[in-house]
Structure formats: C-alpha cells, structure tokens
Image (cartoon, rainbow, N blue to C red):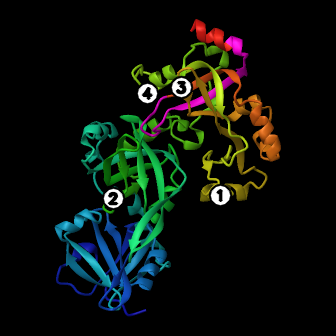
Amino acid sequence: MAKRDKFQRLAEMQPTMTYFSTIALIVSKSSPNIFFDKMSGTERGVINLTIRDSPNHLTNCKCWGQRACVDEYSSMLQIGHVVDIVGAKVMCIPAVDQRYQPQATLSCALVVNEGSGYVVRHDQDDSGNILILQQLLQCPIKPLGATLKLKDVCSRLGSSDKIITSHVNLLVAVACVRPVRQIKRKLQVAHNKSQELLNCLEVIVIDVSYPDGMLLSIWQSDWIRRAQQWQPRRTILHLVDVRVSYSDFHCCPVLSHSNCTLICENPMVVGEDCSLLLSFATTVELKTFDTCAQMELDNLPAAASIQNQMTVRQIYSRAEGELQNVSTNQFTAVLYGMITKFDLDGLSSHINRKCTACQRLILHNLKDCASETCQMDFLLNNDRPKYTSYFNINIQFSDQTGTLVETRLAGNPAERILGLRADDFEQLAERDKSELKWRFLLKYFEVRLLVKKPTGMRKNIMVVVVDMKSIRLEKLVEKITVF
C-alpha cells in the first residue's frame, strides 16, 4: 500500500487539490458503467460512491479505471463500509451532474483515477471511528419535515399527467417486499441482438395518508440486497429524490430508485415522525399487499352468507365497469355456469409454496426462501418445515353472458372440492390428473365467489372460489329463467 497523506475532512475540500485523502462512510453506490475505450482499445469503467463523514457533509466520489479495477471496487465496497480514499482529485460539481448522481451538500466532489489514487476498506482495528461513521447510515440526509405525503404525490400525478416525471422526498414504512423478478432487456450490439437479464425488486410502501400502498421499484443490485432485509411494518425509509412517474401498466403513479436517489433506513432523529409512522404501520394488514397471499385465503367469507346471484357480465360491471361502487373494494356473488377451463393435466403449475418464516411466495425456480434471515432461522430450527404448499389453480366459468377468466381455486376450498391435499396432487400420475380434470370440466356448477376489485398494486380483478357444487342442467335453466 502506498504511503498515505494526512487524512482530511470532506469540508476541507478545495477545487485546487490534486491529492486529497479522507475517511468516509459509503451511503450509496451506483452500478458499474463499463464502456469500450477506442484510444486504448480496452474496456474501462466508472463507479460512483456517495460518501459522508458528518451529518452535514455528503458528496460523491467517482472511481475510474480498467474494467478489472472497477469490477473489484464494485464487489469489494458495499453500502455501510467505512473506506479510505487516497490520492483523489477535488473537482467542482457541474450542475448537470445533479441529475445523474445523488445531490451533494458540498460544492466539490472527488475523482479517483486508477494509478494515481485508490479506495480501500478502513483499518478494522480502528473500531471506534468506524462505529461513529456507521451511525451516519441512520442520520437523515434532509429534514424529515420537508417530506411529502404519498396521498399528495398520487393526487398531483393523475392519469392526465402521464408524461410528467419528478423527484420527491418521502417518509414511508415498508408494507411488503416482493420476490426479485428477472426481466429481459434487448440489446443491439454490432448488428447482433442479445438479451440482458435485469433484476428488479418491488417494495410496497405506505404512510398515514395512503394506507393502500405505493409501488417502489429497485433495480440496483446493492440496494436489492439491502431491501431484501427490510421487515414489513418494522422498517422506516427516508427517501430523498425518489423518482415518481405514472405507470401505464399499473394505471397509477409509482416510485422508482434512480441514480440520484438516496435512502436512509430507520432514521434516528428527535421527534415523533418515525414513531407515529411505525405505530400506524403495525395496524396495517400485511396480506393486503403480499403477492403470495393475495387471495387472503384465511379470511374468506362463510359460503352460506353469499346469496346475491349475478351473471358474468354483472360481476365484471360491478368490479370494473359501469356498476362499480368506489366505496367498497370487494363483493360476493353466486354464479351459475359451466366450467370451460380447468387445465389440471397441462404444463401450468397448480401448486404454490410459501415460506413458513416470512409467509412470502417462493419462486418455482428456487428450492427455499431466498431471504438470508429465513435461512438463518431454519438453521437454528432444523425441525421446522421450510415451506407449505397450497393449490392455486386457474378455473374459468361461462354462462349466457360471457366467461369469467380470472377465477382461482385455491387453498382450503380447493382441497375440499378436489378431495385431496396439495402435496398429494403433486404425486398423482398424469392419467389420474386427467381423470380428476374431467370430473369437473364442461359440468354445471353453483359457485360462490369472493370478488376483489383492481387496485394500484393489482391491475386485474381477483376472483376466489369460496365454495362450489355441481348441479343438473334443469336447475341451471331454472335459475337462469327466474333470474
């Protein structure tokens, strides 16, 4: 290691300095940007570290070098690490840079070039200074009183303002952390089409003004790892310069972590802002947001209480059409019709698994829950089952007015109606699955349904079978005639 100059505080930076050294905490980090350098004929890159060494002083440090150097920085340096930055140049911050990196509280930033400067982890023996600096992770970057309410953000960005995109400051609670999704992005390189897999983590956040929840998308790998440890109803986030825009897919405003966004987890400040929000979050039902429990199978109404007969057309009209009542988000219905789709012996998966520790959905390509917290819990409790299986089958009903395509036969009602458990279904031979399917397909049934209307977090309606029993054609005709 090269001999270090005297370490200085970030507040001492001057634009004329060409060899500046400091000790600071990494509070955010960008993904590496790799490019081909025509002058040298090699791949080079840059990575941005957002650093602070006091509650009031925060800036950015760009690290340039060959691809191997930048990749090493990316794997070695993590958010929350205390680092030594040695031999950096001090640069004035151009106004244009504020759009592509977190906003600094200082007028200068640092640049580290491979060969003349470097960044390393701070000496672990200096535990006193490390602990002091790491406390800055929970120190808000901006005053919490300057945050907006989610309700105000949503009302200011309606469907008529789809093109408007802005950045806002928020104080929110985590309501749900969904499983990581992989999304393919097409790339055009030298006339050859290729695909890049991007990871995306969706988090539902709430505050007192908007308990329905708002979607926050995170694409950066370092923040995805941290977000997977956030605990629903227990983690508070101070979001600074988070991007808000209108989503055509969700048909509502959504949030996303951008290059200039900063996140302070569980901010430690004087006042009641965080404690009041945390108290409110504990009263919110988790299953409202969790994709693995969207069906809310443990809270289905009693079948005998469902008496209101409807046709398929009326169900759609009440859920999302001209008969929709905005004062309620769900209703029940009795439907008389034929099962026209029940693909038990097809290629689709009909069994879902959820983690017994966090109750989240386990993706089909994973053996166990991906959460490190859950994995540690299972190591300490070897006898505890890691997941439970439940039915989640698409079933479609048709009557004289149309076809109800979003219906799910799931959970305990599915086991009761099919006459077997989810674990036993997976052991059936294909011939047995086919025979089971034809016991129901193209037969007439009286079906009692729970219908949930679309929300910002769920684009389509959700229909759950509470109970169903077969009927003769004569009764079907009678019900339709009387109705």
Label 3 vs 4, first from the N-terminus: 4
> Would you identify the image quadrant in which residue 397 lies?
top right
Judging from the image, what secondary structure is the residue with disc 4 in? helix
243 or 263: which is nearer to us?
A: 243
Which one is in front in this view, the residue at disc 3 or the one at disc 4?
3
Residue depicted at 23% across the width and 87% down the height: 18
Which residue was labeled with disc 4?
Answer: 320
Q: Is residue 322 above or below residue 265?
A: above
Q: Amino acid at mark 1?
A: Leu
Q: Is residue 458 above or below residue 65?
A: above
Which one is in front in this view, the residue at disc 2 or the one at disc 1?
1
Q: Is residue 425 left or right of residue 15?
A: right
Residue depicted at 25% across the width and 65% down the height: 104
Which residue was labeled with disc 2?
Answer: 261
Q: Position of residue 376 (x, y in %)?
A: 66, 59
Whether residue 105 is visible, yes or no, is no
User: Could you say which disc has been placed on residue 366 in the image?
Assistant: 1
Q: Amino acid at mark 2?
A: Thr
| Segment tinted magenta in the rendering | 453-475
Is label 3 in contact with label 4 (beta carbons under 8 Å)? no
Q: Residues within 10 Å of mark 4 (few under 14, many from 20)?
A: some
Q: Position of residue 227 (x, y in %)?
A: 48, 56
Label 2 vs 1, first from the N-terminus: 2
